[in-house]
Image (spheres, grey):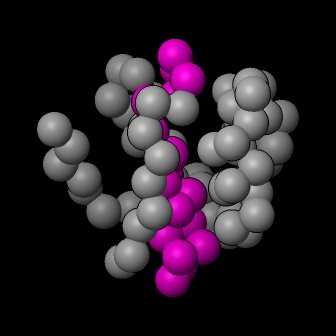
């Protein structure tokens, strides 16, 4: 798995990552819960990670619309 990560995205979204090979987006929230969504295009991932209001864009375009999938257990420091 090759992940691309952006850190400190917003107050609620701590990190957002993208698995290039699988087309899966990982979202790490401030309470350290992780949600994996697939299929997600790389352009959607970059749109959210560079948005002025990423939480709003995540809610409108991903949360509840693109299915959550199981992902690896990540040990984040």
- Residue range of the region highlighted in magenta in the rendering: 10-26
Residue nearest the observer in this picture, 21 or 63: 21
Residue shown at 75% from the left, 28% from the top:
52
Residue 63 shows up from this direction? yes
Taking the spot 36% from the left edge, 77% from the top edge, the residue there is 1
Q: Which image quadrant is residue 62 in? A: top right
Where on the picture, by quarter, is residue 29? Answer: top left
Q: Nearer the viewer, residue 36 or 15?
A: 15
33 w.r.t. 61: above or below: above
Q: How many marks?
A: 0
Residue 9 x/y as whole percent: 54, 32
Q: Toward the viewer: 1 or 47?
A: 47
> x, y percentage for residue 49?
63, 44
From the top left corner, tell me how far across and down residue 8 is, in percent: 45, 30
Tell me if residue 11 is in the magenta stretch. yes
Residue 28 forms part of the magenta stretch: no
Any part of residue 69 in sight? no
Q: Is residue 8 left or right of residue 68?
A: left
Q: In this rendering, would 34 be left or right of 66?
A: left
Residue in the picture at 39% in, 61% down? 71
């Amino acid at each position: 798995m090759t992940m691309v990560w952006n850190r400190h995205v917003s107050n609620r979204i701590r990190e957002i990552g993208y698995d290039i090979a699988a087309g899966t987006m990982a979202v790490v929230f401030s309470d350290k819960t992780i949600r994996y969504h697939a299929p997600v295009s790389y352009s959607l991932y970059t749109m959210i990670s560079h948005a002025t209001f990423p939480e709003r864009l995540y809610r409108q375009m991903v949360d509840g619309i693109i299915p959550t999938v199981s992902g690896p257990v990540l040990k984040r420091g």
